Amino acid sequence: MPGRETAGAPGQASPPVANAHHALVAREVVLLLETDARAGLGTDEAARRLQRFGPNVLPPAAGGGLLWRILRQFHHPLIYVLLAAGAVTAALGAHVDSAVIFGVVLVNALVGLVQESKAETALEGLREMVRTTATVVRAGRERRTPSADLVPGDLVRVEAGDRVPADIRLVGADDLRVDESALTGESVPVAKDEVVLHPRTPVADRRNMLHSGTLVTGGRGTGIAVATGAETELGAIHRLVGAAETVATPLTAKLAAFSRILTVAILALAALTFAIGLARGQDAVPTFTAAVALAVGAIPEGLPAAVTITLAIGVARMARRRAVIRRLPAVETLGSTTVICSDKTGTLTENQMTVRTVWTPDASCEVTGSGYAPEGAVLGPDGSAAAVEANRALRWCLLAGAGCNDAVLTAKDGRWELLGDPTEGAMLVAAAKGGLPADEVAERHPRIDTIPFSSERQYMATLHRDGSTGDHLVLAKGSVERLTALCRRQMAADGSLRALDPAAVAAAAERLAARGLRVLATAMRPPAPAKAGALGEEDLSGTLVLTGLQAMLDPPRAAAGAAVSACRTAGVTVKMITGDHAATASAVAESVGLLDPGDTDERQVLTGADLTALPAGEYPGAVDRARVLARVSPEQKLGLVRALQDVGQVVAMTGDGVNDAPALRQADIGVAMGRGGTEVAKDAADMVLTDDDFATIEAAVEEGRGVFDNLTKFIVWTLPTNMGEGLVILVAVLLGSTLPILPTQILWINMTTAVALGLMLAFEPKEAGIMNRPPRDPARPLLTGALAVRVLLVSALLVAGSWWLFTWERGMGASLPEARTAAVNLFVTVEAFYLFSCRSLSRSAWRLGLFTNPWITGGVLTQAAGQLALTYLPTLNHLFHTTPISGGAWLRILGIAVLTALVVAADKRLRRPPG
Ligand SMILES: Nc1ncnc2c1ncn2[C@@H]1O[C@H](COP(=O)(O)OP(=O)(O)OP(=O)(O)O)[C@@H](O)[C@H]1O
């Protein structure tokens, strides 16, 4: 098969003809790839090619090879210190110590490697969750398939909002524009068409080619996939770059910088200690040991890893609640969100439309039935089902709904399914209920031309041929304001045309909208002899006849009300941003609790036109005050985000269309819809909702707060250990006394407790009342004054406790190893007790229920077993210079640990805010 070669099978060298598709005419490309320009590939052939070429995905980034990844684990100042210490210790003849130090370095590297790859796999998994689909034609039928299933030779269709799924040679294009910044870095969209180009045209200028990974920003196109997966241009770049995905956020960067500075300071202090010791005439060996102990103890080496893991766990939790994080910093920002700007349709509501009322200038008719099943009837004012025959305007109104429509309803296993826009689906169903099924309408009035719907245009119009007379007629539907502006006449029940009464139409629309119904107007241009030329927007104005209004119900989502009220309690303002009418929007806003019923403050509801009329100075304040922003165009959303940010808000903004992308990028948290959203919107977003539900945003905010809490808890827990250890050694050096804890023992404490105790805080469930607090001020440091005091307090208790115990044991005649073993056990026991306290930063550990987090309980038990092994196992005794200790010593250890816990509890109690 020649196509096999041109597409470049994975692992095969590309023959010279590869990448030359731009220089061939469409027919040659079709022949070369053995496909069909109209019907596409056969299903069997597609399956065979999938076998042969493999799925259309990029191979996972190599990440620099295992050896390189292992080596990277050693790139840390602390590891350098340890390696130097190990070498010096070995040179001094202390082989056991040096073996322990090297062993710890090795274990540390392995743990780092495992953690790193786990975090990466988690992020990879997220990417999988937002799988893209592509429209392909196979065996003559158009269908959506996962992009991964595309093969060379597939006939692919793309339209505005799509991500290009493969390298494609265009065979047809209609006003196609593509954002190729993913490949070229140039963000200005490029126009594309199917012209044949010179063979030597550089890749960057091949305007008849679409490249995988780029985004379609406008128009539509059809083409043949010529390369998939690793063989695409994107694949080539991917190979070059190796796509080194880092898991860095502003916070991790800040913490990494903090620990770098700290490390340098501590290393300097350790060097100073060594110098002072030598100057005082102390022996070089113990002085060196002390300096190493100081460095090892005081450097918070576990911090960056713990932060990354906590973030990764947070991301996984959010994914379980159907919020997929695309950019890690969003996890932090979510906790600080102060305003959520949400779409109405589909996010706060179900996007399941049913026409309830059809209004015509002479009568108003109710429609029965619900859902997309065409079961029900259009009832006349008297309740009879013969309404459609009696009212010409009603008939034309339903006809416009069915004919000016791109949606398709299909019955599958007795259930009706909609392919397309729910607004259009509802109108199809209403027409069918009135005796005008879509296929009959299409047969009697075949469509010739279309002005498609867009949010800016707010209407759609279609040109049809009357099957019997051959005359041309126009059908249109759209927002009431836009359509009435295009009409000069309206239709009466007997079919006669009268002058339009805009006030009456507006009043009827207002009444329907006040019930929370979404109202669309319909219009027609009476049949007239055919004129040459396409349907243009300019020749609609003034020629249309208004036939009626269709009002549809889109019920609020079940969880929306509760989520809005949860946001309110949490100090997060919710605003509805919609393209719909202000009255409909307000009614829906009331039903989900976004507006208080009876609240007459008009400033809470603004329209796009109001916004345009506002003086620049008043704009931010007005936007900040408003709760409902109706008839807003996607372009205005960017201004809204900016205005809110100007008044200091942290803004989450939802969006689904191509035009929403700038606002999503500008927002602190851009939220795209996983189901209804375009690829362009998803690409611009920080977070994607896989269920499109508003309640999911609220859940993500809650999880974001939880992540921040857990990070703070870990830091508050870990810092006293480092400070305590560092100070114990410093005091020993200053006093010129023997070390109460040896460097290898410090290594034991740090390495084991970080994993068995500290890490468990990342699994801590969110505290009750997490959504009763105001949002976190992004400028507030992680360690507030009160928490810093607690860290100092616990550090001081650790230093005092361990010194007292060490001295006491020595005074009671215990050997040096015994006293040290007691001191080591004291450190770990205090940390374990303190761990329970750190489960909540403000509430008492008792209140939480001591053993409600099995991870913490399990971790503490594991650590306890480890301490017993360290104290009583001869091998560990030998490695870590420990020895069994007396029952009395254990009692004293427990006593001090309990005392510390009591002091921390008292500190919490004293600082708890009143109430
Ligand atoms: N398929 C359509 N054909 C014609 N007019 C439409 C169609 N869909 C919506 N409209 C009209 O255009 C207006 C704006 O629609 P748009 O899609 O921008 O926002 P929306 O769906 O109403 O609300 P949201 O912004 O909450 O999703 C609608 O209120 C409606 O009057």
Image (cartoon, helix red, strand yellow):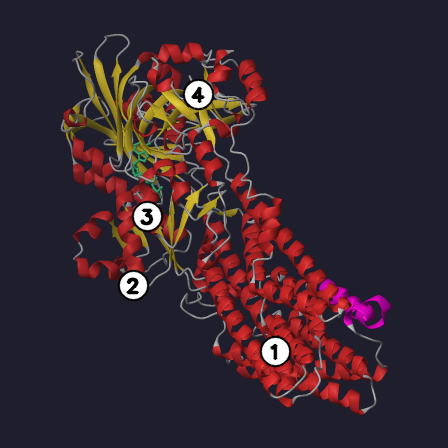
Image side of residue 317 versus residue 338, left or right: right
Image coords of residue 44 (percent x, y)? 56, 14
Residue 38 appears in view? no
Residue 19 appears in view? yes
Q: Quadrant of residue 10?
A: top right
Mark 2 and mark 3 lie on one chain; the one further toward the N terminus is: 2
Q: Are marks 1 and 2 in contact (CB under 8 Å)?
A: no
Which residue is labeled 4 in the image? Answer: 226
Is label 2 within 8 A of ligand 1 (CB to nearest ligand atom)? no
Image side of residue 245 versus residue 894, left or right: left
Which residue is labeled 1 in the image? Answer: 726
Which residue is labeled 2 in the image? Answer: 647
Image side of residue 428 versus residue 328, left or right: left
Image side of residue 405 versus residue 54, left or right: left
- How packed is label 3: few (under 14 Cα within 10 Å), some, or many (20 or more)? many
Whether residue 868 appears in magenta in the rendering, the answer is yes
Secondary structure of the residue carrying tag 4 is strand
Rendered view: 486 above or below 297: above
- How packed is label 2: few (under 14 Cα within 10 Å), some, or many (20 or more)? few
Distance from the alpha carbon under mark 4 to that under mark 1:
63 Å
